[in-house]
Amino acid sequence: MVLAFVTLLIVSAFIFWTTEVLPGDIAARVLGRESTQEARAAFRESRGLNRPALERYVSWLAGAVRGDFGSSLVNDRPISDVVLPRMNNTITLAIYAFAIYVPLTFLLSILAALYHDRLPDTIVSVFNLIGLSMPEFVIGTLLIYVFSVSLGIFPVMAQIQRAKTFSDVIRNTTLPAMTLAIVMAVYSIRMLRDSLIEVLDSEYVRMCVLKGLPRTRIILFHALPNAIVPALNTMALNLAYLIGGVVVVEQVFAFQGLGTLLVDSVAVRDSPTIEAVALIVSAIYIAANLFADVMAITLNPRLRRG
Amino acid sequence: MSTPASVATLPWPKKAILNWSRLPFTLRFGTIILSFYLLIALTASLWAPYDAAKTGTGRPFSSPSSDHLLGTDQLGRDIFSRVVLGADDVLFLALTSTLVSTIVGGVMGLMSGLLGGWIDQIIMRFFDAVISIPFLVLALLMIAAAGPDLSGNYWLLILAVVVVYAPRTARMARAVAVDLVTRDFVTVARARGESVLSIVWRELTPNAIGVLLVEFGVRAGYAPIFIGSLSFLGFGVRPPTPEWGLMISENRAAIISAPMSVLAPAAALAVLVIGLNLLTDGLSRVFGRTNKI
Amino acid sequence: MQHVRIALRLSVLFLLIVGVGVISNAQDSTGDCVRLAGVESSGEKLNLDPINQPSTENSIVVGLMYNRLMDLSSTFEVSPELAESWSSNADGSEWTFKLRHDVKFHDGKDFTSKDVVYTYKRLIDPATGSEAAATLAFLNSDGITAPDDYTVVFKTDKPVVELPVLITNKNTFIVADGATSESIATAPNGTGPFIPQDFSVADQPHVFAKNANYWEAGLPKANCVEFFAIQEATTLNASLLAGEIDIAQQVSYATLPTLQNNPDIQLATAGPATQMTMAMWVDTPPFDNPNVRKALKMVIDRKAMLDTVLLGYGYIGDDNPVPPQSPYAWRPEDQVPGQDIEGAIALLAEAGYGPDNPLKIDLYTAEYIPGAVSMAEVFKDQAAEAGVEVNLIIGPASDHWDNVWLKYPFVGSGWNARHPGEGLAIAHRSNAAYPETHWYRDDFDKILDSANTESDPAKRLALYQKAEQLITEEGGSIIPLFQQIVSAVRSECSGYEPRAQLYRVDVRNVSCNR
């Protein structure tokens, strides 16, 4: 736990000081191209930006430790008001994307590993490699044209806020969730397939086969737990990506999420908002990693000795 | 996977590489694809029908024809010429940045896993901090901090890719190293009094090479896309450079009007990725095979 | 066979999840709302206060809920809105506006001259930090008075003969007396055709209901408006094609081929709108040499640039901030000279540049408006024909106005349509707030000053034209193109007329039959 705080501290310091050295004047960015010098000076004064950077960082940090992340420099609203609505959207989308991504990864990588070097493996691998070389917005746009414009099944825009029932939420977010799931799965499938093949090839699994255990059992209870460790790390990483790194997908589906907020905040140099979002993403990443490590140790007792 | 200590320390498999026909199919096919790309990268400037930046060579958004094999983009530039002329930029950017990050990340990760203790903790905490910042934002912060004069500079972009990728590779490499350090051959090497770097190079690298190569193959394909995503936000390679990630990104609005302006560079990238992955897959098999003798 | 079974079980799980989405394929009931889309997003800067409008998203939502004293046409003719009539004294230094008596704010309060006086004083008060303070600098706080409840008087130090036009811009929407940024954020109050419903920054869409007590009889026609900010051109295009939005204020040039022959979509244009500029500092080498400036203007094939950068949806510019199509223009479009590579090479040779010593220049730009990077790329390519090496330095759009513009000697720029009185002054007067070409010329200032105080329209026009000729022939602005606004409207809807002013989207007359 202490280590987790150390990481968060490093992140907060790193973000603050990089934002500090970025060229550009937040007053000019918030007030616009045509604002006057007087107005910019008044803005800086009102937001306390004339104080030394170190003083601002320390006072922000003191607040953050107590759970007060300050106010957005842009509109002076409390950070929680700014971040929470978007975080709700993002988390909904992330859960849905994960729900598609995890089974998709397991399904396809098990399939590929079982039929190693045969047709199913080749098909999975080729699609995988194509997916790997397709940017998110190409995948997203293709899905939009197939499912929204041609078939009319799902809406183009992921209007999550007006979704009132659960099925509305699902319908409105299916396309972005699918896009994200594909983007994440292509990398994980490759990792998991390779380690599955390696494990299936091991003496341990051969022993199980000799013992006459059913293949389903071997795969799910003997091979998978051993092969899953590197994949778990990737999944933890992907969770962090889902929370803060999906700017491009958010833009393609006109979705109001944390990623867009983060990039917008960098563009105007709004450090309290950048800090808050980055810390949320870091905390989730650290928690996911911790979970992945615990899972890894549970599944692979040999690691306990190390 | 339990390999005898003496065998695992074998140096690079020189013999295996010499015999082309005995090499795995994936390695041979991958090599052919990559050589083809290298050939294009080196010679395209001699035979490309148009200059990559030449505007108005045809009507904007023309469909493919004999004059323009893949049609034209919005500025009337020849897409085919841009794709082939972009090969050198893409290969340079993708390979250099991924190679550097794989080496930096791999060595750091292996060392960290080997040394353990507080050094390991410091390195990994630091890398965790870097990883946990969304990668686009990290790159964006770096490039914005460098100022407008360096925007689009290749070395800056490479640095951005390295800062983003190396910690991820390091994490992967460390996981492998942690698994390996408990093995007998590492213990033996330590007992022999080998230096840290020597253990990393002679004991750990040969065993981690498979994982690192897969990592390299996957990341190298993603590097142009990553740089393209930076262009999406206004950073990245400077137009009118015919870099594929940038082409995909700047033509994305035309994906229906002139699909080739997006799909051609995407396909070029896809084949490159497939080639790289076949190659690395084959290489890891070669190393795996020799390790198992 | 066993692994097939595993695969089957896992795929059933997967299909179940996706299936829920497909089954629940019910259309949203949007009533007869007009669904409107803009291409810019203000992010967290979005607010309903007219005083600062960081993007067109702001301006559009502000325009839905407020009125101004006057409305402006695409060609900058003023028409009555909250002011019924106006007049000035002989020299134009005192203007009297008569206000409508029948207007109420959304909260039921009567609209009076107090609101107008408060609005304008607030705009020029340095403490509030309005972006309009610079363009409204001819006003002074003491000169804005209200002799009675329905009369407002503007007294200026010097005559301002175009005052009605100049006090009508995107920031001059009338707010209620006493309104502050804070009160507007929590309880917005205007007189306009639509009322915001639980406005919040992160909403998508923003919903506005019809103002049942709106003062214009029979308007607005729609019961409600939903506003979407869609930054991705392909997404906007797909939303139009899929019928998720009715009106797109501006569509990307690259998506036009998919809309042009589509029976479901009508395209409507307005313009000349935004000017596309490359600005040189006339006091900095090599641009301090008039021959270099002239040569760089001559290398451009404006027609070819128009046909590629804007796919023809725009107008050729004349390096003059006033477009050739304007009644104020110095010379019409057909007299604008074409590309002259030979002439440019000769001028460059006079300035000391040739094949052995090519002119090399850095152009700093970004995609700050659609097509800006394309223009730079075409310019680079065309300049190469005259042996000029243009090095493009392209950065992020979000950094352009703050970090690059006004800070480097050759930058991309642009200005949305303005009245000549404002358009000529904003970047070119010696005391201009945005001296993008460092064009500090007393003779130019004198012409502008006499134009602004000249009450005879014909003489005023002649003075404007003289100023324009000076800028065109000697100035540091390269203005090869003016954009058109290209709006797309679904065929079910009617009554939408786009305006040249990007900030103004008027949907009072729009109705949709779905």
Image (tube, rainbow, N blue to C red):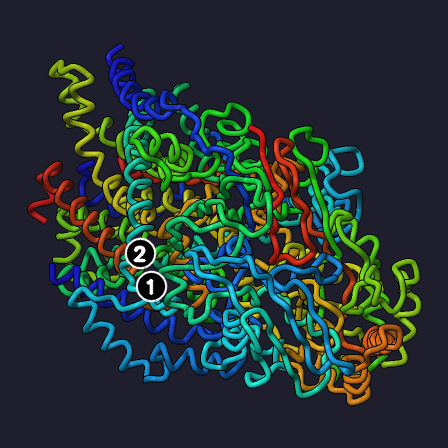
Amino acid carrying label 1: it is: Thr
Taking B174 as reference, is B251 left or right? right
Determine crowd level at label 2: few under 14, some 14-19, many 20+ residues with C-alpha closer than 10 A. many
Residue located beneath label 1 in the image: A273
- Which of these two is toward me, C36 or A177? C36
The residue that appears at 44% across and 32% down in the rendered structure is B23
From this viewpoint, is residue C501 visible? yes
Q: Position of residue A22 (x, y in %)?
A: 43, 73
Quarter of the image with the N terminus of chain C in it: top left
- Which of these two is toward me, C509 or C369? C509
Q: Position of residue C304 (x, y in %)?
A: 82, 53
The residues tagged by marks 2 and 1 sit, at their Cα atoms, a distance apart of 8 Å
Mark 1 or mark 2, which is nearer the start of the sequence?
2
From this viewpoint, is residue C284 visible? no
Q: Position of residue C202 (x, y in %)?
A: 39, 52
Residues under numbered marks 2 and 1 in contact, where contact means CB atoms less than 8 Å apart: yes
Which chain does tag 1 point to? Answer: A
Where A86 sits versus A205, above or below?
A: below
Dot 1: what SS? helix
The residue that appears at 45% across and 83% down in the rendered structure is A41
Residue located beneath label 2 in the image: A83
Which chain does tag 2 point to? Answer: A
Where B40 sits versus C62, above or below?
A: above
> Which residue is situated farthest in the top direction here?
C1
Where A111 sits versus C351, above or below?
A: above
The residue that appears at 76% across and 76% down in the rendered structure is C476
Taking A195 as reference, is C37 left or right? right
Q: Position of residue C363 (x, y in %)?
A: 68, 69
Determine crowd level at label 1: few under 14, some 14-19, many 20+ residues with C-alpha closer than 10 A. many
Taking C446 as reference, is A21 left or right? left
